[in-house]
Image: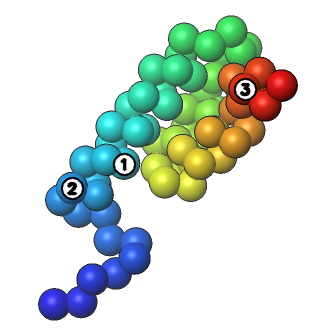
């Protein structure tokens, strides 16, 4: 049995799901414009891991966290 670094099943998949749901709830509750919310939501849904990381680094609330 070979374990891949990008395998997202079992416990790893559950963690990604929980983090993506948290991101989506935060996106929807943010003060960003509707268009930005839709774009971020699509990114997180279509690219779960990469979308979450990008949202965490560059999302609407990431600017206020860095200050």
- Res 18 → quadrant: top left
Pick the front one: 67 or 61: 67
Residue for badge 1: 16
Most extreme residue toward the right is 67
Give percent across and percent down for residue 6.
40, 72
Give percent across and percent down for residue 66.
78, 31
At 32% from the left edge and 71% from the top edge, which residue is drawn? 7
At 41% from the left edge and 39% from the top edge, which residue is drawn? 19
Give percent across and percent down for residue 21.
38, 31
At 23% from the left edge and 62% from the top edge, which residue is drawn? 9
Dot 3 crowding, Cα within 10 Å, few <14, some 14–19, many 20+: few
**Element on which disc 3 rests:** helix
Mark number, residue 11: 2
Q: Are marks 3 and 1 in contact (CB under 8 Å)?
A: no
- Is residue 5 toward the left or the right of residue 37 in the image? left
**Element on which disc 1 rests:** helix
The quarter of the rendered structure image containing the C terminus is top right
State the CA–CA distance, disc 2 to disc 1.
9 Å
At 28% from the left edge and 54% from the top edge, which residue is drawn? 13
Residue for badge 3: 65
Say whether disc 2 or disc 3 marks the residue closer to the N-terminus.
Answer: 2
Pick the front one: 55 or 44: 55
- Is residue 55 toward the left or the right of residue 11 in the image? right
């Amino acid at each position: 049995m070979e374990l891949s670094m990008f395998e997202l099943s079992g416990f790893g998949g559950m963690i990604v799901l929980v983090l993506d749901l948290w991101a989506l709830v935060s996106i929807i509750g943010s003060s960003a414009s509707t268009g930005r919310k839709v774009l971020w939501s699509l990114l997180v849904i279509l690219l779960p891991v990469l979308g979450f990381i990008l949202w965490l680094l560059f999302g609407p609330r990431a600017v206020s966290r860095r200050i």
